[in-house]
Amino acid sequence: MLTVLFATKNRARILSNVLESFCDLLAPAGGWKLVVVDNGSSDETLSVLKSFSNRLPLTFATEPAPGKNAALNAGLATVEGDLTVFTDDDAFPRKDWLVELRKAADAHPEYTLFGGAVVPRWEVPPPPWIQSVEVAPAFGMNDPSLKDGPLQLSRMPDIIGPNMAIRTSVFHSGVRFDSSIGPSGANYAMGSETELVLRLGKQGYKAWHVHTATVHHLVREEQLKKKWILQRAIRFGRGHHRLFPNPKLWLGIPRHLFRDIPKEGLRVAAAWAGFKEDVLFRSRWRLRFLLGIAIEAHSMSRSSARQITSGTSPEKA
């Protein structure tokens, strides 16, 4: 048996469509269970969940503490079976999704983590300039050319939140998500599931990619606005520093940024003056990414300084 787990907040309309697609899933060997954790919704989420209680093997719970990872940690208390599958409340699985993950987990007992393909589901046709965007971090996708086989759990692994499975024994050992990172309000450091994947990689766990286990990650119309994507770049930069902190700081900021941020600013100005729209947007993305690193580094440095002043070590905070 396996359990599918995801968190949701204030996406009743999308959630209804996602659960409708879950009703079409082929049952994997051993059966499955679905756990959805409502992370403090104020819309019709609870009513939507109740409406599917007779159509799906569904258990739902609430977690008022803000943050996706806090909700996932709450949901882990109710998982059953030997495999826990994670996804998002805006990811639409292919019918054989769970069947393919189950087959891979059974065929490769020496592997603990499993990731599948995450491809876009455009709510509206994307504008031409979207080709200038780094699609993976902007919209939560991975490389569509990945084939079945081992995955490296190092810098920015290809296992991502909308489509990953972990043997439940990992969580029985006490492992949990880091609730200080990931979606929580409007401003946050990205890297919800990535932090856990990197941590497990450092502990020696191995990962396998399952190309045939596919989900379609919804890209909403509002996400196709340049303003939204550039805000996403800042969150991506913040998460990057959390996941890969640079110890060489000056005034609480990585030293290289005092060189790289002005340099990228000049690239933005040059692209703007040369009317090179694609180059301009890529440079603006890179600049916001670097600014995100600076913001998170400075915030973490100030937090560490406060803990030292108060006599509390960062490790114990």
Image (cartoon, rainbow, N blue to C red):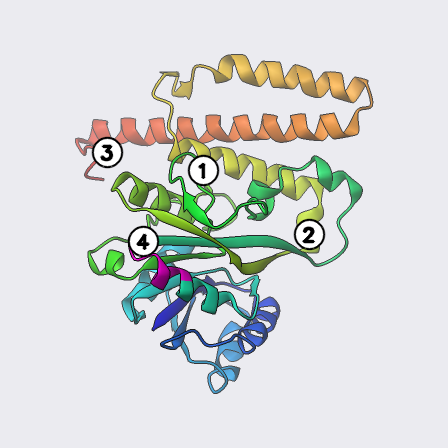
Contact flag, marks 1 and 2 (Cβ < 8 Å): no
Looking at the image, tell me whether mark 4 or mark 2 is earlier in sequence order.
Answer: 4
Q: How far apart are labels 1 and 3 at the CA level?
A: 25 Å
Type of amino acid under label 3:
Pro
- To which residue does mark 4 refer? 112
Please, what secondary structure does the residue beneath circle 4 have? loop
- To which residue does mark 1 refer? 156
Contact flag, marks 4 and 1 (Cβ < 8 Å): no
Type of amino acid under label 4:
Thr
Measuring 52% from the left and 63% from the top, which residue is drawn there?
Answer: 89
Residue 314 badge: 3
Residue 121 x %, y %: 66, 57
Picture quadrant where residue 248 is located: top left
Please, what secondary structure does the residue beneath circle 1 have? loop
Q: How far apart are labels 4 and 2 at the CA level?
A: 36 Å
Residue 280 x %, y %: 73, 26
Q: How far apart are labels 2 and 3 at the CA level?
A: 38 Å
The answer to which of 263 and 79 lies nearer the viewer is 79
Q: Is residue 210 left or right of residue 21?
A: left
Residue 286 x %, y %: 60, 27
Residue 307 in the image: above or below residue 197: above
Neighbour class for label 4 at 10 Å: few (<14), some, many (≥20)?
A: many
From the viewer's perspective, is the residue at label 4 or at label 1 nearer? 4
From the viewer's perspective, is the residue at label 4 or at label 2 nearer? 4
